Amino acid sequence: MTDTFHDSAISPNAPRILVVDDDPGIQTLLGRYLREQGFDVRMVGSGAEMDTALAADPRVDLLVLDIMLPGEDGLSIARRLDPKTRPPVIMLSARGEDIDRIVGLEIGADDYVPKPFNPRELLARIRAVLRRHRIEPDAHVEKAHRTRVGDFAVNVQTRQAFLHDEALDLTHGEWQLLQFFIERPNRVINRDQIMDYLKGYERSAFDRSIDVRVTRLRRKIEENPAEPRYLVTIWGEGYLFAPSGRSPRSPDVPAAAGEPT
């Protein structure tokens, strides 16, 4: 079962969502519900159909991607999509295993929703991801909208971040996490506070998805992620963002050889 974009009842400016799920019930439910909410939706049932849809019309604002698909699975599809050109991705999984969520985050997914799910919850996730969607800046005015914080500069209008005036190539999730820390410089933040801000993740003492996101962000902002200067681990307490950088061997900040508990 496949649909097409350009539903005449939908605004031509409506966000376009491509749902990749082979379950006919999910296709019917989401197709109807998301259209009722004003989205332009197309449904496909496999990675091959997704490739065909994107080749025919690549103007997709968000991809909802099931992990359990016939043929190529959703994690494999997400891995091969170019993070610089692909739309933001929300992963779906009927298995609901932590490893799926962690792997999905590691390969750059913006959110993860376990099945079965309430359509209203998925709608909230979709809207949150679209709000964080990066908009290309006007080259003539973008720099005027940057706010400097230590060695960093941010443009909240375009969801861009810079380190020493060099643009950082961040995913939507990485931008969201960096923005959280930039708004709370030189403060110890624990994992629960980060999880509360990011929202949408089930609380578990064994949930390491926050640590995965921190590790990914460090790879983008640290010269040596094993000895971070900007995003440091405070043992037994959480993380501290030092926007001007600090020595990883500072006596009050131990070097990061792992993650906090």
Image (cartoon, rainbow, N blue to C red):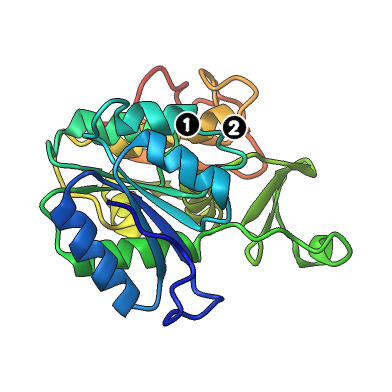
Secondary structure found at label 2 = helix
Label 1 CA crowd tier, 10 Å (few <14, some 14–19, many 20+): many
Q: Is residue 39 among the parts visible in the rendering?
A: yes
Q: Residue at x 33, y 39 (%)?
A: 210
Q: Is residue 200 left or right of residue 54?
A: left
Amino acid on which the number 1 mark rests in the picture: Arg
To which residue does mark 1 refer?
A: 216
Q: Residue at x 63, y 63 (%)?
A: 156
Q: Position of residue 23 (x, y in %)?
A: 17, 47
Nearest to the observer: residue 38 or residue 198? 38
- Is residue 257 left or right of 137 when viewed as pictured? left
- The quarter of the picture where residue 31 lies is bottom left
Residue 122, relative to residue 223: is it above or below?
below
Query: Residue beneath label 2, please?
Result: 220
State the residue at coordinates (51%, 18%): 226
The answer to whether residue 208 shows anywhere in this view is no
181 versus 224 height, above or below: below
| Percent position of residue 261, x then y | 24, 31
- Is residue 143 left or right of 200 when viewed as pictured? right
Circles 1 and 2: CB atoms closer than 8 Å = yes
**Closest to the observer, 150 or 85:** 85
* Secondary structure found at label 1: helix
**Residue at point 26% right, 36% down?**
67
> Is residue 78 or residue 189 the one in the foreground?
78
How far apart are the alpha carbons under marks 1 and 2? 7 Å
Residue type (three-letter) at the residue carrying disc 2:
Lys
